[in-house]
Amino acid sequence: MTLKVIAYARNGHTDKFGIPRQSREESPILTRIVFEPDYAIPEALRGIEGYSHLWLLWGANLTPTLSTREGDKLDWSPTVRPPRLGGNKRMGVFATRSPFRPNPIGLSSVKLIRVENGELIVSGADVLDGTPIYDIKPYLSFSDSHPDAKNGFAEETKDYELEIVWSNLPITDQEKADLEYILRQDPRPGYQDNPERVYKMDYAGLRVSFRVEGLKVFVLNCERL
């Protein structure tokens, strides 16, 4: 089967470091879904404004490929190390949303903000700028929502958030809101916990320097690239 790229995602996530680990409705970050010429047909979007949320089926095309294991000749790993579990505990790949999968395909539930000049403006996408989109489907609350569903080991850390401590930085209110959303979720690898280490992250033309001490993120600098 050959998958066709129907569109590309465009947003400020130019660096994999800092991409939200899950799609969430409360995200202030907007993503444009820009269709390829063969699929930029107004009729293909007819009726989509009637939905509040959509499913995006996308390709994790920039995820590093795992080296083939000697002996068992696997080009994928049956276990992965979820960052929220500290990065040291292994879980089955099919029990996680890790991008390191036999087929690097992602699925995200996003909120449709508006249709603009043949493009979809959505919030809550957990994808990198330039991510290929393979398909778009409407989210249906009567079939896709399961309020009594169990969340497995993800339940343990779903409410984990950090407090942001800002310096006096020359950034806009929107940039501050976007960065606060990203940093609040702690983009660091789960196995790193050095309060003296300064991390750097690129987002929407900004290079952000920060460090984490306990449950606080100290934003040190924002440099415009």
Image: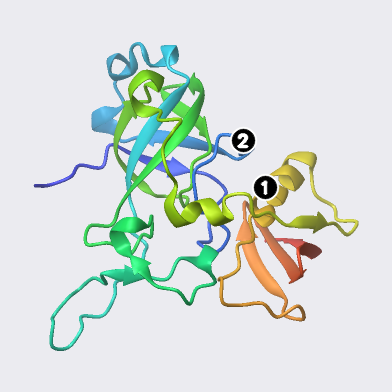
75 versus 13 height, above or below: below
Q: Quadrant of residue 39?
A: top left
Q: Quadrant of residue 216?
A: bottom right
Label pair 2/1, CB-CB below 8 angstroms: yes
114 versus 14 height, above or below: above
| Residue that numbered label 1 is attached to | 181
94 versus 73 height, above or below: above
| Residue that numbered label 2 is attached to | 26
Amino acid at dot 2? Glu
Compare residues 7 and 50 and report the one nearer the observer. Answer: 50
Residue under the image location 48 percent in, 77 percent down: 88
Amino acid at dot 1? Tyr
Residue 77, position as x, y percentages in the image: 27, 72
Mark 1 lies on a secondary structure that is helix
Mark 2 lies on a secondary structure that is loop
Residue under the image location 73 percent in, 43 percent down: 177
